[in-house]
Image (cartoon, grey):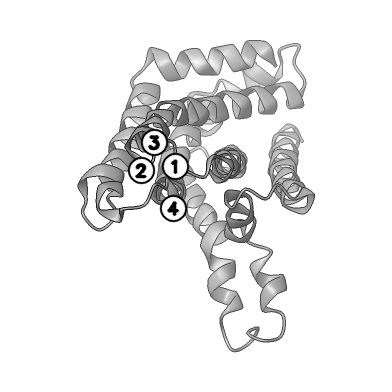
């Protein structure tokens, strides 16, 4: 697993993929947080990073599919997947190595945003007037969110040899998982009956809970279960190819 992890990270940073992904993420979040008047922290007049944690899932919805789209589809396209599975590595080693490398890149993109937190602390009146617990919870939620999106991207990349198809499928699935259940819970079919249950099936419900600084084991279980399910489906996909 370690060899795959290092190989994938080297692949990201030996090409422009890793650098472009990080720059685009920081550029988009920076524009929304500091430049665009409707979402600017400066115009908000309140010491909060809420805008970052509202915008970041939308950016991740396109950024992470761009990172994961070549994980397996590129191996299939070049015909190197068969060579990879014949090496003394288990399917879990291959899947986990690729998953952790892609997730690491998403987390690396998040690290520079800590300067936004430092800026808000300095700009607060009085200085340091910010809900640090909510910020920590939001970062944890964002990492779990990236974990689900990455696992979904790895799985969808394993079922196609076309990177563009993998990108579109992953972006669509991420949208469904994050927002669709909330919209569905508000339809007449479920509203007032099973709306809370349907809403709880989506990522946004659990992400919002953690973003408020409440670390609930039910939310953690949801994220871990979703990640585990997609990784298991990826392994099944690789096994099916062997058959």
Disc 4 and disc 2: Cα gap in Å? Answer: 23 Å
Q: Nearer the viewer, mark 4 or mark 1?
A: 1
Q: In the figure, 89 relative to 179: above or below?
A: above
Residue at the spot of label 4: 54
- How packed is label 1: few (under 14 Cα within 10 Å), some, or many (20 or more)? some
Q: Which mark is residue 98?
A: none
Q: Which mark is residue 127?
A: 3
Which numbered mark, 4 or 3, is in the foreground of this view? 3
- Placement of 53 over or under 21, stated as above or below: below
Residue at disc 1, secondary structure: loop
Kindly identify the residue that appears in the image at 72 percent across and 72 percent down.
197
Do the residues bearing badges 4 and 1 touch, measured as CB atoms within 8 Å? Answer: no
Asked if marks 4 and 3 touch (Cβ < 8 Å), the reply is no
Q: Mark 2 to mark 1: distance in Å?
A: 6 Å
Marks 2 and 1 close (CB-CB < 8 Å): yes
Could you tell me which residue is drawn at 48 percent across and 24 percent down? 78
Identify the mark nearer the N-term, 4 or 1.
4
Q: Earlier in the sequence, mark 4 or mark 2?
A: 4
Rendered residue at 48%/56% (across/down): 172
| Residue 98, position as x, y percentages in the image | 60, 25
**What residue is shown with label 1?**
129
Observer-nearest of 70 and 66: 66
Graded by Cα atoms within 10 Å as few (under 14), some (14 to 19) or many (20 or more), the crowding at tag 2 reads: few
Q: CA distance from mark 4 to mark 1?
A: 20 Å
Q: Is residue 168 visible?
A: no
Disc on res. 125? 2
Quadrant of image for the N terminus: top right
Image quadrant of residue 231?
top right
Label 4 vs label 3: CA separation? 24 Å
Horizontal and vertical percent position of residue 201: 68, 63
Quick one: 214 or 7, which is closer to the camera?
Answer: 214
> Residue 60: in sight, yes or no?
yes
């Amino acid at each position: 697993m370690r060899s795959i992890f290092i190989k994938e990270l080297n692949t990201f940073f030996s090409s422009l993929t890793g650098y472009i992904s990080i720059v685009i993420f920081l550029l988009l979040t920076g524009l929304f947080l500091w430049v665009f008047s409707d979402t600017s922290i400066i115009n908000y007049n309140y010491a909060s990073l809420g805008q970052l944690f509202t915008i970041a899932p939308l950016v991740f919805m396109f950024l992470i599919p761009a990172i994961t789209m070549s994980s397996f589809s590129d191996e299939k396209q070049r015909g190197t997947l068969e060579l990879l599975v014949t090496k003394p590595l288990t399917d879990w080693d291959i899947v986990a190595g690729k998953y952790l490398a892609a997730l690491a890149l998403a987390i690396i993109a998040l690290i520079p945003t800590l300067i936004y937190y430092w800026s808000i602390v300095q700009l607060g009146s009085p200085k340091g007037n910010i809900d640090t617990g909510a910020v920590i919870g939001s970062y944890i939620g964002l990492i779990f969110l990236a974990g689900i999106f990455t696992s979904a991207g790895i799985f969808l990349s394993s079922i196609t040899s076309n990177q563009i198809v993998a990108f579109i499928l992953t972006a669509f699935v991420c949208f469904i998982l994050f927002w669709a259940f909330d919209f569905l819970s508000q339809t007449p079919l479920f509203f007032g009956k099973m709306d809370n249950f349907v809403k709880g099936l989506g990522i946004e419900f659990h992400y919002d809970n953690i973003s408020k600084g409440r670390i609930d084991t039910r939310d953690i279980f949801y994220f871990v279960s979703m990640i585990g399910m997609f990784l298991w489906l990826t392994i099944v996909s690789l096994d099916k190819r062997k058959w």
